[in-house]
Amino acid sequence: QVQLVESGGGLVQSGGSLRLCCANSGRTLSGYNVGWFRQAPGKEREFVAAVIWNDIITSYADSVKGRVSISRDNAKTSVYLKMNSLKPEDTAVYYCAAAGRSIRIGIRPTEYAYWGKGTQVTVTS
């Protein structure tokens, strides 16, 4: 059973950092591909970053590449999204999502079966 819960969002000034956490209600995320998406008001949900089940392959959207890193904790219960050099255009609700084991990283929302409810990130100028 997969029940994703995001945390770590908040209000931060431009140039600041945040670390978002995606947890599976205390259960393992081992064996799942996990992705982060975001949705700003009036815009479609867009891909941010993802990691495949064995942590060997990661992928990042061009808009965040070099500023964001995705990682999984050693216990395999959480996936983190560390965001640096935040910009006002990063303001959005951030969602984590999980999909079954695959060597292919999904970058479209339709490729993920499980979703959290999101955490708000607001970056002020």
Image (cartoon, rainbow, N blue to C red):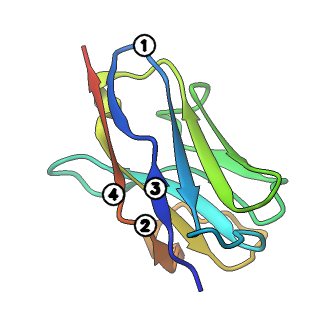
Mark 2 or mark 3, earlier in chain: 3
Horizontal and vertical percent for residue 51? 69, 55
Mark 3 or mark 1, earlier in chain: 3
Query: Disc 3 marks which amino acid?
Result: Glu
Q: Which residue is mark 1?
A: 15
Location of residue 2 with respect to 24 vertically, above or below = below
Query: Disc 1 marks which amino acid?
Result: Gly
What separation in Å lies between label 3 and label 4 (alpha carbons)?
A: 16 Å
Query: Disc 4 marks which amino acid?
Result: Arg
What separation in Å lies between label 4 and label 2 (alpha carbons)?
A: 13 Å
The 10 Å Cα crowd at callout 4, few under 14, some 14 to 19, many 20 or more, is some
Q: Which residue is mark 2?
A: 116
Q: Which residue is mark 3?
A: 6
Disc 1 and disc 2 in contact, CB within 8 angstroms = no
Mark 3 or mark 4, earlier in chain: 3
Q: Which residue is mark 4?
A: 45
The 10 Å Cα crowd at callout 2, few under 14, some 14 to 19, many 20 or more, is many
Disc 3 and disc 4 in contact, CB within 8 angstroms = no
What separation in Å lies between label 2 and label 3 (alpha carbons)?
A: 6 Å
Q: How many marks?
A: 4
Secondary element under disc 4, as helix, strand or loop, is loop
Please identify the quadrant where the C terminus is shown. top left
